[in-house]
Amino acid sequence: MGRTVKMQDDTYIANDLYSTDERIIGKWIDGKTLYRKVITGTLVDGDLDVDLTSLNIYEIIKVEGFCGNQRPLNFYLSGYYVSTRFNDGHMLIFASTPYANHNYKMILDYTKTND
């Protein structure tokens, strides 16, 4: 475990903020609890549907990550691209053919509907 940091009325573990388990990382500007989860997988040729309904996401605050040989998850290069979009509890990741079968790591910061 990392060192403990006090932020407003809650306590967070500063060196334990990146995990495939859901973590509380602070408060968003509207006062809602801010969560983070790292999601990993393998891209397909076309749309990959990542079901996130169990997270009860209210609002996506930030999505970042990498695929393949350290390309960002949202990029366009010489006619090929990888893009993400969130819809009804599902993260859709589109990958052009050269990036199919590449691994990805996505860092997702969000608030929840039940907070």
Image (tube, grey):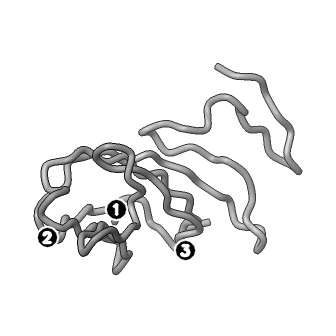
The numbered mark, 1 or 3, whose residue comes first in the sequence reads: 1
Residue 104 higher or lower than 21, as above or below: below
Which x, y percent locates residue 99?
Answer: 19, 56
Task: Please give the residue where the numbered disc 1 appears in the rendered image.
Answer: 52
Q: Say whether marks 1 and 2 touch (CB < 8 Å).
A: no
Nearest to the eye among marks 1 and 2: give it: 2
In the image, what residue occupies the spot 35% across and 59% down? 54
- The amino acid beneath tag 2 is Gly
Around disc 2, counting alpha carbons within 10 Å, would you say few (fewer than 14), some (14 to 19), or many (20 or more)?
some
- Mark 3 or 2: in front is 2
For mark 1, give the secondary structure.
Answer: loop
Return the x and y of residue 58 as percentages of the image width and height: 52, 74
Residue at coordinates 73% horizontally, 52% vertically from top-left?
A: 26
> Relative to residue 47, is residue 35 depicted above or below?
above
Q: Earlier in the sequence, mark 1 or mark 2?
A: 2
Residue 46 circle label = 2
Between the residue at mark 1 and the residue at mark 2, the CA separation in whole angstroms equals 19 Å
Kindly identify the residue that appears in the image at 24 percent across and 70 percent down. 80
User: Callout 1: 10 Å neighbours few (<14), some, many (20+)?
Assistant: some
Q: How far is mark 3 from mark 2, CA to CA?
A: 25 Å
* Residue 5 picture quarter: top right
Q: Nearer the viewer, residue 10 or 77?
A: 77
The residue singled out by tag 3 in the image is 59
Image quarter in which the N terminus is found: top right
Identify the residue shown where x is 42% and y is 59%: 55
115 sits to left or right of 47: right
Percent coordinates x, y for residue 35 in the rendering: 59, 54
